[in-house]
Image (cartoon, coloured by chain):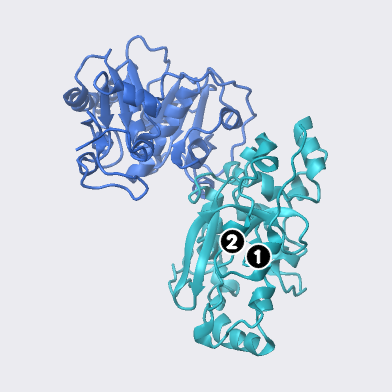
Chain colours: A cyan, B blue
Amino acid sequence: MSGRFSAKEKKIFDDKVFQRSCRSCHASCGDCHVSSPKVGGVSTGLIKGHEFVAKNDAKTCATCHGGRVYPEFTGDFGGQADVHYQKGMTCLNCHNKAELHGTGTLYTSKTDVREKPSCTNCHKPGSEKTDKARSSHAQHKDKVSCYACHSGGSYTNCYDCHIGKGATPKPGFYLGLNPKDKKSVTTLRLVPTVRDTFRSAGITQDNYDSVPNYWATSTHNIKKRTERTRSCEVCHKDKQNFLTKEMLIKDGSKANSLLIYSPKPVKQ
Amino acid sequence: MKKVIAWGIFVFCLALFLPTAGNTRSIDPVVSTVWLAGNTQDPKIVIVDIRKVEDYKAGHIPKAVNIFYNTWAITEGKLRNQVPPVDDLTDIINSAGITADSKVIIVGNSDIPPNRSNITRVAWTLEYAGIENVAILDGGWEKWVAEKKPVSTDIVKPKASDFQPKLNKNMPVTKDGVKTAIGKEIIVDTRDPDFYEGKKKLDFVARAGRIKSAVNLPSMTVYNPNGTFKSKKELADMAAKAVGSDPNKNIIVYCDTGRLASVWAYLLKNVLGYKNVRMYDGSSEDWMADPAAPVEP
């Protein structure tokens, strides 16, 4: 998002917007381990009296991530629980302490964090139980993200955000090129920033068209089997859920069209 | 003397939910907390806790495995609360260590209506998959805790079984099946009267009203305030007023998404002995989206 700002606008954003809005969730120790962070000005209070609570995923994590990620994970949004949740895993089974607390290295984007979880940390390529899974993974290696095939279905996309008014969430499921590399196919999530999101703060986003409105997303609704793992035709013939020019949001960033990808037919 | 009276009450309560004649069950369809506490050592008992993972981790009935409700009932296309594809359902059942001769006890929250009907929906799904001995814990987790019965925080990971579902295809019914049944079978709307009468509807249901010819038998009337079921006689009286007493009648139950209807689907068949009960699990969400599907009022 900050790529859209000029240097002057970035300073206004840091002073006026980040402190008022983003800071409510960017927390200190006690915000997660003693009380829950205020979200939208609302606090759910102390987790367990004045005790320091090491782990309570539903409270220490879901208070901030309860709008999008957590309901997706439990199936309360979208109606299909993530397979890891089905098997009894919660946030901290994948997201470790080093990732959450940091190691002293500053990253400018969460996608750059070295300690972030990866599917292949546990699911080693080549260790698949079936030939079909093994060959599918080999064929799509470095071309398609795990999420693109294993995302269970719709996830939250947010539209039309304005300071003080918030955004409108709607379910959606989009496949297209990863904005980071413009090569690999992955799940895309609509970011709610529109051209006049920060206008009331004096930010006109001079470089708005330099960054797309859709970003690669690590969906938290993973399933072992999906329509796409069951049939090649879902992508390679029907092209279901792949972004098209007609699907792009109106008056969106000109960079959006660079994410459109059309899978080629395959012989089965 | 007090012990004799207490034992008498216990036996009487058990008798209320004894399996009906002709059933192949070897376990009652509704079991009490007292019964379960005395039978957890039975190697064939598999206790399935359908509460959220974090609630299970905080405490559960000893030996219970956790398979959360949203695993058993998924959104498929535009329809909520659908049975997962059979390969996924097979994985789910086997991950709980359930075999054909298991006695499966479903435990869930009994605090609010949707949680109560989650329990029967899972029981219905297991029966649909071909598991004969399925029961639900009367009063659910809340009653177990209220009675200060043992609670464990040990995570149970059973050895996976290799059960292959044999689907009871006469248990669900499609929209076309319901259309054919109008005027010939008893169609039961299990929603609250305001929904049956068309005064209210849920946002995702296209039209208000009920399936043509449906009678009303609300699912939420079957519970006592503490989430336990009313007596078998009370349930039988309620059912008889709506569908009559002939156990051979063909009955179709429905609600908005196929969750609430599972309460009466389960009770009519397993507790009251109605032999031909099917559930339209597409329910109003499916029916009302079809402009050609007849609706009253």
Mark 1: few/some/many CA within 10 Å (<14, 14-19, 20+): many
Which quadrant of the view contains residue A212? bottom right
Specify which label sits upstream in the sequence, 2 or 1: 2
Whether residue B269 is visible, yes or no, is yes
**Answer yes or no: do the residues labelled 2 and 1 have beta carbons within 8 Å?**
yes
Q: Quadrant of the N terminus of chain A?
A: bottom right
Residue type marked 2: Leu
Which quadrant of the view contains residue A174? bottom right
- Above or below for B146 versus B216: below
Residue of label 2: A248
Residue at x-position 57% and y-position 85%: A203
Q: Are marks 2 and 1 on the same chain?
A: yes
Residue of label 1: A256
Whether residue A48 is visible, yes or no, is no
Residue A218: % across, % down: 65, 56
Q: In the image, B7: left or right of B64?
A: left
Callout 1: SS: helix
Residue B35: % across, % down: 39, 27
Callout 2: SS: loop
Which quadrant of the view contains residue A238? top right
Residue type marked 1: Asn
Q: B281 or A268, which is in the foreground? A: A268
Q: B110 or A86, which is in the foreground? A: A86
- Above or below for A141 versus A217: above
Residue extending farthest bottom: A8
Residue A191: % across, % down: 58, 66
- Above or below for A203 versus B143: below
Residue extending farthest top: B22
- Above or below for A118 versus A257: above
Q: Chain for mark 1? A: A
Q: A186 or A83, which is in the foreground? A: A186
Q: Quadrant of the C terminus of chain A?
A: top right
